Amino acid sequence: MGVASRNRWKRRVSIAGKRPYHNPMIADDGFDGLAAAEALDRVGAMVDLAGDRNDAGLTARALALSERLASRPGLTAEARILLHYFRANAFDNEMHHAGDAQSWSWELAHYDQVLLELRSAVREEGFADLDQFRQCQILTNLGNKLSAIGRPCEALTQWDRAIALNARFAMALGNRGHGLIAYARSLYDRGHAGVLMGSAYAALTAASDADAIFDSHESLALAKRFEAMAAQLASTLPLDAIAQDLNREYSLGRSRAERSYRRWALDNRLFLSPLNDLGPYSIAAHDVLHLPSMTLGLVDAGPGPPVAFGFYNQLKQEYVSARWLCYEGLSEHRAHFSDRETHLFDTLSIPAYSLAVEKTKIAFRLGYSLFDKIAFFINDYFRVGLPERAVSFRGIWYERKGDPKPLSTVFKDRENWPLRGLYWLSKDIYEPAFQQVSEPDAEGLADLRNSLEHKYCQVHEDLGLGYSRFAPPNGNDLGFRIGRDLLEAKTLHILKLARAALIYLSLAVHREEAVRRAARPEGLVVSTPLWKWKERRRL
């Protein structure tokens, strides 16, 4: 859903007279003898020119050279980051060569490779030391790619990271505005949609201001478009009232402990409210998202409310419980009395044994378990028809037979943006039968989950030194070793992914209900209200 230029490596090679192939900057000759910086420049120039000319052969050559460069020992962090970035642009070229760049197809060749390369660039240890302008370009591109496939929650995080680095970076601002409009249109709550539209107006206005910074002449041409989009929003929205609502301070609770918890959840964008994707605004400190109104035929309807509402209730409760356990695990700094007089041996590796660590582990396991449960919801609601034992979050999207298994006809080219987002989110989860992923750490997360559920996970205190990276091994492969800091970071990552999945599930149902309503013949529809479950009934 992005409107941005592709933010390429803009060290262009002259193409006057249509004879760029004679330029040594795009030749293969002597590549392996070039210094790393020169070789990197050549790859970047080739990728850029191949995109401009829609030259599939030049893109293929650039990718081949990039692999040779990646195999060189001793590349600097900056070189590794830029190489990932150039490779992402090269795979993006491949999509344009195939005519898939603007397709509604769910299975887009090379899209997972684009995401994998951009994410790998962002996660290199030296990314924060990279030139800020280049950081903004990479983060903006990653946000654009996530938004286009139906993942606005994660896209907004990337755009906001770029804007935090440079508040006038036009392409992050403009794409944030454009992405918020798409996100708002997918919501069933029109009040929330209006707030997102108001934030889109602010971003688009900033992107078209005279002091906005564009990264190329190609991008600068979009300033007028951003301005026109902002004007359109201004003509239909009560912008002042929206801004007042968003910035008003609402209570975060009666006790200091509750206020601290809710502030932490806001800061980490963990509330089940689309408004939390705008930032840590107190208006978003509630888990208000649920399923939209649903219509069932007489055959499907039972004596009670649709089972989907009870199912989503349970998904939400498990998620918010995991979130609380994670908070307690991260914030408890004193030994709990339940740990007193527990007889344990010192294994000489600074082990982390405490109730707080176990809470963090449980939060990870609870969060991870939600993905397969969401698959069961999809199997029932979208009438996929897989037998119960065949349902998993990675496998729900595919036919049962084939090598490789083809996308199920239930989902093929289905115009449901958030449902497609769930499909692409599933590619962040590793399963042995589905090893192609778009998340660099997917297999590591799966290994951690497997060890927590079935084997032995050794958690070490890092002592601020990253001790777990060089802690002595236990003598065999039985234990999965991880530092406490890394365990906490991975738990937060899984919770954010589970939150996004729950939001996309709700929005996907909303879209499907609209499609079914449009296709349903006219007839009598009886409305049955559902009442909110009162908190005083919870024990």
Image (tube, helix red, strand yellow):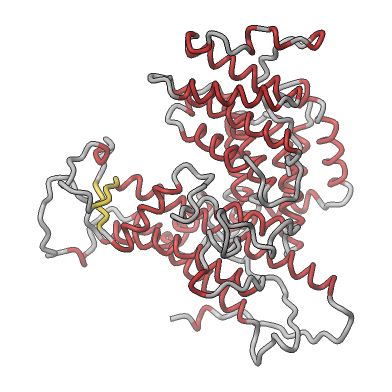
Total labels drawn: 0
Q: In the rendered image of this protein, does residue 12 appear above or below residue 82?
A: above
Viewer-proximal residue, 459 or 398?
398
* Residue located at (51% from left, 47% from top): 436
Q: Position of residue 528 (x, y in %)?
A: 73, 85
Q: In the rendered image of this protein, does residue 474 appear above or below residue 411?
A: above
* Residue located at (69% from left, 45% from top): 148
Q: Position of residue 9 (x, y in %)?
A: 64, 21
Viewer-proximal residue, 6 or 205?
6
Confirm whether residue 163 shows in the render.
no
> Which quadrant of the figure has residue 357?
bottom left
Which quarter shows the C terminus? Answer: bottom left
Confirm whether residue 294 shows in the render.
yes
> Which quadrant of the figure has residue 212?
top right
Q: Position of residue 399 (x, y in %)?
A: 60, 63
Viewer-proximal residue, 330 or 101?
101
Q: Position of residue 217 (x, y in %)?
A: 77, 20
Left or right of 243, for residue 394:
left
Which quarter shows the N terminus? Answer: top right
> Which quadrant of the figure has residue 207?
top right
Left or right of 230, for residue 457:
left
